[in-house]
Amino acid sequence: MSWFKRNQKGIKTPTSQKKDSPNGLWVKSPSGKLIHTKELKSNSYVFPDDGHHQRIGSKEYFEILFDHNEFAEIEEGLIPGDPLKFEDSKPYPDRVVASQKKTNLKEAARSACGKLGGKDIAVCCMDFSFIGGSMGSVVGEKIARTIDYSLERKIPFLMISKSGGARMMEAGFSLMQMAKTSAKLHLLSEAKIPYISLLTDPTTGGVTASFAMLGDFNIAEPKALIGFAGPRVIRETIGKDLPKGFQSSEFVLDHGFIDFIVDRRELKEKLMELFKLLDN
Amino acid sequence: MNNNNTVLDFEKPIVDLESKLNDMKELADKNDVDVSKAIKDLEKKIETLKKDTYKNLTRWQRVQLSRHPNRPYTLDYIYELTSSFIELHGDRSYGDDKAIVGGLGEIDGKTFMLIGQQKGRNTKQRQMRNFGMANPEGYRKALRLMKTAEKFNKPIITLIDTPGAFPGIEAEERGQGEAIARNLKEMFSLKVPIICIVIGEGASGGALGIAIGDRVLMLENTWYSVISPESCSSILWRSWDYKEQAAEALKLTADDMLGFKLIDGIIKEPLGGADKDLQKASSEIKKVILKEAESLSQLSIDELINARIDKFCKMGDFKQEEANVGV
């Protein structure tokens, strides 16, 4: 127990010999729980200690959902235009290019088809890291074409929403994506093909007011922010603080707008169970 | 109406000249002097000034006109358009939202279901109408009325005039997002013609929630976009002071929206805006409604619905990246 006795005061290691642990090896949940990234990944990016669901993107969701991480991407070549020549602090195309470089993504949604528990499925997943997961023409079109894909093959459609809403820089075009996606979902519904809408943190604005709420089955990850108007806007409008837990998955479940909340670690199994029940 | 003498900045030169003209006329009457030529000149000058002013409005000025305190609201138009109108209330599940009104009305011998957002004209009314910001039950009432119209085979007319769906605690509790989303989807299935007209403000999902139509039209001095210029300014510039710039950037006028093929047409307003002449504005709207309703009635139900779906599915602006060009 000699380490109890401190012979030398302070840390004597010279700075030059200091050993850093590589960046990004450990991550911390909001409640302060530390976990190794490898362990987090093997746990579907959920912190085992407090159940916090880390925000993840399409890459991670595809990895979690598709059997052996095997899938074919649909319409990956769609990239945004600049119909309005929109400019605020910088031109919209510059913003897009910067976001593409930063995220290594082409847009705020990716679509893929593959097998989930041996069954074909078409999935579209939003990436929040790309301009807040905002919905412009490309996101709307990708969703529309993924629905077409699932219509043609008569396979279920899963939409994973994670978005702040419509993309301002595409103004009117962005708004009409709400209409477009709803039109396609109407066709899917007529064809009686199952549509599962998974709402993750956060799902707000025009996304909530269109496809995210239109599932045959609306499901959500725990403690996600789900709502139409953003909490800040509501607070400013009514001029008082919002109740605790307002606009959380649990709140939305309580008010009757989602079917169930699913832990990400059980997501794939739960979907397989649901599909089996629909098939039998 | 017209009890409010609000003058917008850019209308001030016109109003000044008009009051000068009145003064001149009064003077002429009192003193019995012949100033008829001067009056004529001034009238001409006013006419030219009006034409120039209203032709060259900036986008922000159009936004201002769309919110003019004297601007006709949904019920003003409905009473002007119809020879008989019965208002129908309630969503049959929660309540009656006063921010969306609707009912059966007769226009030129033909029955329509008319639905629209309603704003108030004075403080008390504005409060009752919640400034034209509907709650979920408003959208659900609208959908109920549309289904009634479908059942009895009556074409639907929606009049859009809202600063947005209401952002409040109760609205979220009752599913604002779900209510709008459902309307979007259901309106694509309605087996009757739908004509949507933006008569004032067309803000975001709150407007779109009753604006899926076979014809989507905008009055000349209205706006329709994903966000109001003020909110856009506060998000992108972190201040409300850039609303004029935001209005320019959003390209939210009727001309812009038609240019982008996001709407189907523009309805002319009387010179100076609908607030200056309700009768004239209404008669133009009536003409367009009757014409469009007639042309839509020629289509079969399948043609009608397919065209409606196709039109909205074509909306978007994107590029197809060439193969092997990495980002």
Image (cartoon, coloured by chain):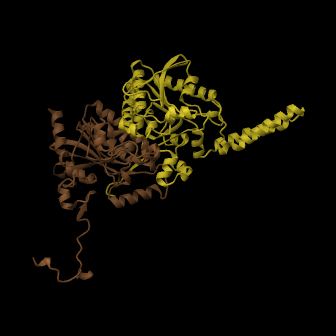
Total numbered labels: 0
Please, which residue is most extreme toward the left here? A1
In this picture, residue B190 sits left or right of residue A69? right
Kindly identify the residue that appears in the image at 36 percent across and 35 percent down: B174
Q: Residue furthest front?
A: A5
Q: Where is the N terminus of chain A found, in terms of image quarters?
A: bottom left
In percent of width and height, residue A204 lies at: 36, 45
Instruction: Give the x, y percent position of residue B166.
Output: 44, 38
Image-quadrant location for residue A131: bottom left
Considering only vertical position in the picture, is A22 above or below B79? below
- Residue A225: give x, y in percent of width and height: 33, 47
Q: Is residue A260 visible?
A: yes
Camera sees residue B157: no
Q: Which chain is yellow?
A: B
Of residues A129 and B51, the one nearer the viewer is A129
State left or right for residue B307 relative to residue A115. right
Question: Which residue is depicted at the point 26% across and 42% down?
Answer: A158
Q: Quadrant of residue B180?
A: top left
Which quarter of the figure is the C terminus of chain A placed in? top left
The residue most toward the top is B109
- Report x, y in % for residue B213: 44, 31
Q: Is residue B231 above or below residue B100?
A: below
Residue B68, quarter of picture? top right
* Nearest to the observer: residue A177 or residue B231: B231
Q: Residue at x 18, y 42 (%)?
A: A270
**Which chain is painted in brown?**
A
Please give left or right for residue B313 compared with residue B260 in the image.
left
Q: Is residue B107 left or right of residue B280?
A: left
User: Does B57 appear above or below A27?
Assistant: above
